[in-house]
Every structure is written in structure tokens, then in C-alpha cells.
Amino acid sequence: MEETTASQAPFRTRKKPSYPIGDDLRAYLRKFRRERDLPVTYERLRHFHEAHPLMDSEGRNTLWESVAYQAEDIPALNEDLKRIYALLRVDGDFSVMQHLYIDRIDFCSFGNSTPFRIRIVNAFNDNPDYFYIKKADASRIYGLELEHLLSPNRLNFITHGNTLVEEHIAGVPGDIFSARWLDNRELKPIRIAKELVKFNERCFVRLLGDMRSYNYVVVLTPDFEGWQVRIRAMDFDQQSHHGRKNFYLPQFFKENSALAQFCAKHLHPQTALQYQREEQTLILARAEITAPRLGALLHAMEHDPIAPEENVQSLREGLAEHFKSPRYLRCASMGALVRENIEMLRHHHGVGLGSLGAELILRAPPAP
């Protein structure tokens, strides 16, 4: 939720612990050029000397603060932040970045990664962009990379020691979309419903949890026959951490009840099953295309303790019961459970795996 205002999100009293980057994951990041030398670290940004609350256009507190640094430190800091942006966007070609300037640096103590958000602006046309500098967390990095490999979305991020740099994920926050866009006559209800089924499936297969409405965005793209819809995760802190199976199914969160009820109203169970199978086929195709890289990532993930043992045990039992497969009971880590989910798709594709599409219709949460 760091990528948007957090005013819509309830305060969490228990934060997921941050997990350090292990040797296997670090080697993976270096091999695939995710680990780079950076001129600014997270700790350097922590040395601001004042902050004031950042309000939205309606005067509400966003839970972000704009921070200020000592005047003598600002020129060098701004140049170094521009260099990070160049690494993120054009592989470090700073020659095309001279006309950019750092407009604002914000800090949020609300999220798990307590991020800094950098607003960078094109001086020629005043067009802004954002990127984020956070404390590196292994589970979040696994989430980012699995999204990059198994979803239709590509992600740019860089690590350096205990620092993580991420690009901004643009879109309408899910809670705002549900409140303001569901009844928009320009949007075809079946396209919204189809995308929820596909998003639900992607999260479940790769075990991305906590996709409440404020942790994803909805991307609207104009098409010659109306608008296309895509739901994109933007918070990856809860990658393979929780022990409850339904935590990885966005349809069951009460914050998503309006969207789930809307989709249940407009989608026939057989059509939902069709869309589920379509997404399974796409996930398998992506897994095949990226097989060496995905295999290396899952190898690191299988040996990384990114969740308490009791969570692994609870989730493997839940998945074994859900899929009626004892193979899950042999999984000793969250990475092994993700691998088994993908293998289950590969071995049982086309024979009614999970029937999650039908679940969407039959078990949508009650309206709030």
C-alpha cells in the first residue's frame, strides 16, 4: 500500500517481520542484475532533520510526511537520486536525465517497509514520476520477482545491501475503484469480473497474500470496444508468509466484498471456470519461458525461512486438503509450496484444478 495514500487503510497493530536477504537470494539478484551499486541507501535517507504531514487534495492526512534535509546536503542527494532513477529506467544512462529534478521526498512510517517516496519531475513538461526506496525484505523481493516472472506485468527494482528501490505502479487504488467506478456505464461488468477471477488465480498459485482493496490497483486502458481492465498487485510484503489458505484468495477479504459481489452478479460459474483455466495456461506458459530463472528463484526461496514454521505447516495442510493431494505435506518451506502449486498446475491442467472460478460465484463474501 506504500504506492498510494494510506488514508483508506486500517492501521495494522502487528507488522510482519522483515527478513534479511540470504546468500542464495543475493547470488540470484547479482546474476540477474537486480543487485547494483547505488549512490543512495535507505539509511542515508533516514537522516532528514524535519518532516511535516502531507495532505491530499481534500485536506485529509495521507499518513505520508514530506521530509527535509540540511541545505548543504541537498544538491548532492538530489543528483544521486537522479542517478538511481536513471539506473531504474534506462540502465544508468544519465545523459538523458539531466533535465529532471527532485521535487519532493516523502516518508511513511505506516507500511512494513517504512518507505521513502521520491517525486521526480521533467523540467521541460512538468510531468512527474515516482520511485520508492525501502528497507530490503527477502519476502517482498520474492514477491516482486514472482510477479515479474509469472504475471503479465514486468517490474523494475534494484537492491543494494539492505536497500530496495522500486518503480511506481500506477493505477486506481482498489478501494477507490470499488467505491467510484463499479457502476460506471463505460466499463463492461464482465471485463471487471473476468479480471478478478484471473487476479485471484495469480495470487493463489504464487501465494501472494493480503490483497485487500488498498493493496492493489486497477489499470484502465481504452480500447476500440470500451475499456480493458487489469488488476495489479502493488504490495508484496505478504508473499508466502501467512498460514491460512484463504489469505491468498483476494475474493474472501471483506474489503473486497463489493467487488466480489459485483462479479458474482455478472459472471456465470462456467464462464468463471473458463477464465480461471485461461490464467492457469498463461501462468504455465510464463513458467516455461522463464524456467531457468524461475528455478533459481524457487531454489533460493525453498532454503529461505521467510515464514514461521507453524505457518508453513498450517498452509501445507490447508493446500493438501484443498487440492486433495498429500504431496503438499512433504513441503518443508514456503518456496516448496509455491513450486508444488506450479507443479500441480502442470500435472493436472485441464481437469478442474481447484475450481476456484466456481468458488468465486458460490462463495463470494456477504455484502458489507
Image (cartoon, rainbow, N blue to C red):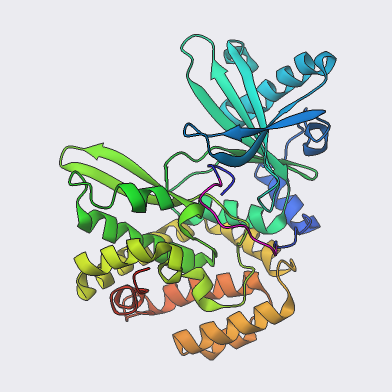
Relative height, residue 313 to residue 202 (above, below): below
Q: Is residue 333 left or right of residue 225?
A: right
Residue 318 x/y as whole percent:
54, 84
Q: Residue 297: which quarter of the image? A: bottom right
Indicate the quadrant where residue 123 lies: top right
The overriding secondary structure of the stretch rendered in magenta is: loop
On whether residue 8 falls in the magenta region, the answer is yes
State left or right for residue 367 relative to residue 51: left
Tell me the quarter of the picture where residue 307 sits: bottom right
Res. 284 in view: no
Task: Indicate whether 12 appears above or below 34.
Answer: below
Q: Residue at x 64, y 68 (%)?
A: 241
Residue 186 visible (yes or no)? yes
Picture layout, residue 149 above or below residue 124: below
Report the quarter where the C terminus lies: bottom left
Residue 180 location (% of width, % of height): 32, 47
Q: Give the range drawn in magenta.
A: 6-14
- Which residue occupies the foreground of this view, 210 or 298? 210
Q: Residue 344: x and y, percent?
A: 46, 77
Q: Is residue 344 left or right of residue 259?
A: right
Residue lying farthest left? 225
Query: Residue drawn 68% across and 64% down?
Result: 301
Note whether 39 is above or below 174 in the view shown. above
Query: At 49% from the left edge and 44% from the top edge, which residue is drawn?
Result: 154
The residue shown at (61%, 62%) is 238
Q: Which of 107 and 317 is in front in this view?
A: 107
